[in-house]
Amino acid sequence: MRFTFIFALLVFSLSGCQKEGPWQKAHKEKEASSFTIEPIASRDYKDAALNIINNAKKYVYVWMFEMGNYRDEPNPLFTALCDARKRGVEVKVLMEGGENFLGERFYKKQKNAYKYLKSCNVDVRFDKPGRTTHVKMLLADTSLIIGSTNWTYYGIEKNTELNVLIKSAQTEKFKALFLKAFNNARKNNMHMPRGESEITIRGVVVYVSERISKRGRAYTIFKVRTNRKTYRVFIRGHHHIKKGEKLLVKGIFYKTKRVGKRIYHNEFEANYIRRI
């Protein structure tokens, strides 16, 4: 009984010694003061993202579902990543690699983003087939933005979006999560949707029709006869193609292509033409 009483008294005394002292209290106050969190909505995202990328000293990690350049100019966030890489910052990007349900436009946008970033030595990887990456995260040193904004023109410039900017040493935990996923990702190959392939053809134009869609967008349908077969080709815009011209055409061939409720078979969507 006496031993039990002494043991209880010892435990009580030790627990009293564990009370927060001045040093521990000051340390906690310092940690609390170094932690900030604020909302980043819609048009504020670009400036916030550019600020933390441009001020990064060690690393910038981007984990993103959808990425793309603007229609007439590079994505400013891509340019910032390239500039960070030039000044010696470690830059890694992990992006969605494409699934069949995402379609051909998504595929082309992602692939162009990949090529642009690789051209300035950014380390870019795609997730594996069958796994959809839906994350929208930017991590630069101790600054983290995470939320709903994709790195596309509409995501950055048009859509209503909401994100959180966190500045804290605790963001290091997100670094470990990112690197684990990045190290398991593919280094160079994006998932090409089934029934689609990139091809180049050379031949004579045998039919041309310049058109305007219901949304007011210009496009051209033309046919090119090669030595083996005749291809029906779609290309955005009016290019003043004429019957009898010889063309080199690059693009993606679709066994089945859906546009709204319409289905097209064996269509070639061109992204490059050159007269030869």
Image (cartoon, helix red, strand yellow):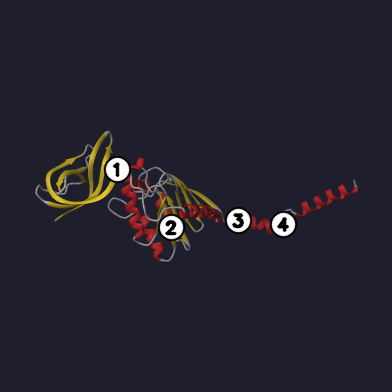
Q: Label 4: few (<14), some or many (≥20) within 10 Å?
A: few
- The number of numbered badges drawn on the structure is 4
Identify the residue position indicated by label 3 in the image: 31
Decide which of 45, 240 is in the foreground and name it.
240
Quadrant of the rendered structure where residue 31 is? bottom right
| Amino acid bearing label 1 | Gly
Residue farthest toward the right in the current orientation of the protein = 2
Disc 3 versus disc 2: nearer the observer: 2
Give the camera-side residue of 47 and 58.
Answer: 58
Q: CA distance from mark 4 to mark 2?
A: 42 Å
Compared across the picture, whether 29 is left or right of 227 comes to right
Q: Is residue 176 or residue 30 the one in the foreground? A: 176
Dot 3 or dot 2, earlier in sequence: 3
**Which element type, helix, strand or loop, lies under badge 1?**
loop
Q: Amino acid at mark 2?
A: Lys
Front disc: 1 or 3 = 1
134 with respect to 231 (left or right): right
Q: Give the quarter of the figure containing the N terminus.
A: top right
Q: Amino acid at mark 4?
A: Gly
Q: Position of residue 220 (x, y in %)?
A: 18, 44
Point out which mark residue 21 bears: 4
Place of residue 175 in the rendered image (x, y in percent of width and height, measured from the top left): 51, 55
Identity of the residue furthest to the left in this view: 244
Q: CA distance from mark 1 to mark 4?
A: 68 Å
Residue matched to label 1: 195
Q: Which mark is residue 133?
A: none
Q: Tag 3: Cα neighbours inside 10 Å, few (<14), some, or many (≥20)?
A: few
